[in-house]
Amino acid sequence: MAEEWRRDGYLLSSDPNAVDSSVVHDFLRQSYWARGIPLEVVQQSLAHSLNFSLRHEQRQIGFARVITDYATFAYVGDVFVLPEYRGQGLATWMMQCVLAHPDLQGLRRWCLMTRDAQPVYARVGFQPSPTPENWMEIRDPAVYQRGTHANSQEKPDER
């Protein structure tokens, strides 16, 4: 069920119909973490995530999404507030609401990655991993440039 929070003329909604995918795509394709991301990939990620749209006067001005199994784990990604709305505590408020969403209570682990917003996440309880040596990843920063993302038509070699 969609949840809503209001503060000082701002609305945060988890209604999937509240997402303006063009605003999200425009921001993400310029971001350091998703530069060049195709619209189709953004749309697929929205379809498979719990999305939070931050709005002011009917305009989407911020966003966050949670990838989760709703039982044990959640990964927070693609969080942003448009530059002209920053400095008002909106990112912190948005993350407080995300963490308070009723469907996300009782999770064992929340994770995220950020290059530059550690203070925002620290204000809502995130800490550096005490065991970073346990985390592993497969990283492919050029996937969008090669067109080999999940939505592309390229298939693995059949040998």
Image (cartoon, rainbow, N blue to C red):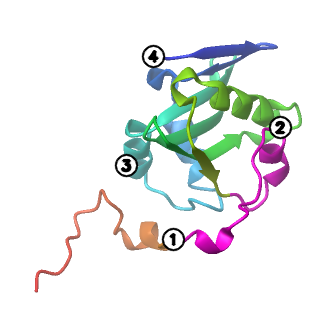
N-term mark: 1 or 3: 3
Give the residue furthest to the left. 159
Assess whether mark 3 and mark 1 are in contact (beta carbons under 8 angstroms).
Answer: no
Sequence order check, earlier mark of 4 and 2: 4
Residue 127 magenta-highlighted: yes
As shown in the figure, which amino acid type bears the numbered disc 2?
Arg
Main SS category, magenta section: loop
Which numbered disc covers residue 1? Answer: 4
Q: Are marks 2 and 3 in contact (CB under 8 Å)?
A: no
Residue 68 appears anywhere in the view: yes
Q: As shown in the figure, which amino acid type bears the numbered disc 4? A: Met
Q: Separation of disc 2 and disc 3 at Cα?
A: 28 Å
Q: How far apart in space, not on screen, are marks 4 and 2 (Cα)?
A: 29 Å
126 lies left or right of 156: right
Q: Residue furthest right?
A: 87
Q: Check disc 1 and give the amino acid type.
A: Glu
Q: In this view, does 142 lie above or below 39?
A: below
Q: Hey, what amino acid is under mark 3? A: Glu
**Tag of residue 40:** 3
Q: Nearer the viewer, residue 150 or 58?
A: 150
